[in-house]
Amino acid sequence: MTDRHSQTFSRFLLLVIILWAVCVYCDTERSRDKRSDDHNPLETVVSGLSQQVTKMAAQLSTQLSQLSSLQTKFDASQKQVAFLAYNSADPFNVAAAGTLVYNVADINLGGGFDTVTGIFTAPTSGLYVFFINCMGASQTEDEDVGVLVDGKRVCACYTFSKEHHNLGSGLATVHVNAGQRAWVHVYRDSGRDVRGSYWNTFTGFLVKTDD
């Protein structure tokens, strides 16, 4: 139930309670006219009904609060986070050890991937899958990379192209908190060429948000 529906339902219920209270009041007044000696019993009945209404209103408020909480969790579970990134140059040079920058993001749901830094920042906490594939640019080049989450290596990818353009890959399933970062790190100090486009990609997506 949306907030608009909840407000409509609350107004409707309040109107019903008011109308019911008016009816009870009218019946009470008619009873007073007929039998003035029944004043105390009628007050007791009205008091009891008033307590029931108060109790029902409190229960309704609790249920609406629980419903709102469930709606919030449901909305969070529907949040889409995914990215697919690569470098537009093919081949491109990796000058030194450090972050491998992918300057194109074909998919960037949730806006977590930065094509300037090559770093993904998780917009929400949950279970994520990260995938990389790698390929050197010639028969004499190798490539040794890995996915880091806040500096901790969670998967690796290695390829040695002596036998002509071998392709490596790595995959990790890891829990990531909102604000934590993930990137691809290069484990070589000397400059080397690697393939670009879809031959070297960095992919990630949210599987499930935290409850």
Image (tube, rainbow, N blue to C red):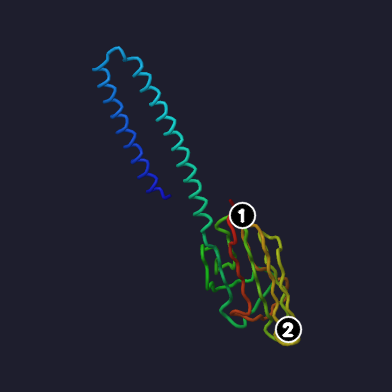
Q: In this figure, which residue is indicated by the disc labeled 2?
A: 161
Task: In the rendered view, tell whether residue 58 sits above or below residue 5.
Answer: above
Q: Residue furthest front?
A: 34
* Kind of residue at badge 1: Asn
Residue found 47% across the figure and 41% down from its top? 65
Label 1 to label 2, Cα distance in Å? Answer: 36 Å
Q: Disc 1 or disc 2, which is closer to the eye? A: 1
- 29 or 175, which lies in front? 29
Q: Measuring from the top left, give residue 120's x and y in whole percent.
A: 59, 64
Question: Which quadrant of the structure image shows residue 146?
Answer: bottom right
- 119 or 129, which lies in front? 129
Residues at circles 1 and 2 in contact by the CB criterion of under 8 Å: no
* Kind of residue at badge 2: Ser
Task: In the rendered view, tell whether residue 152 sits above or below residue 100.
Answer: above
Q: What is the total number of numbered labels drawn onto the structure image?
A: 2
Residue found 41% across the figure and 26% down from its top? 51
Residue found 47% across the figure and 40% down from its top? 63
Q: Earlier in the sequence, mark 1 or mark 2?
A: 2
Indicate left or right for 25 with 171 as reference: left
Q: Measuring from the top left, give residue 48's x and y in whole percent.
A: 40, 23
Q: Give the secondary structure at mark 2.
A: helix
Q: Give the secondary structure at mark 1.
A: loop
- Callout 1: few (<14), some (14-19), or many (20+) C-alpha neighbours within 10 Å? some
Q: Residue furthest left?
A: 33
Q: In this figure, which residue is indicated by the disc labeled 1?
A: 177
Question: Which quadrant of the structure image shows residue 132?
Answer: bottom right
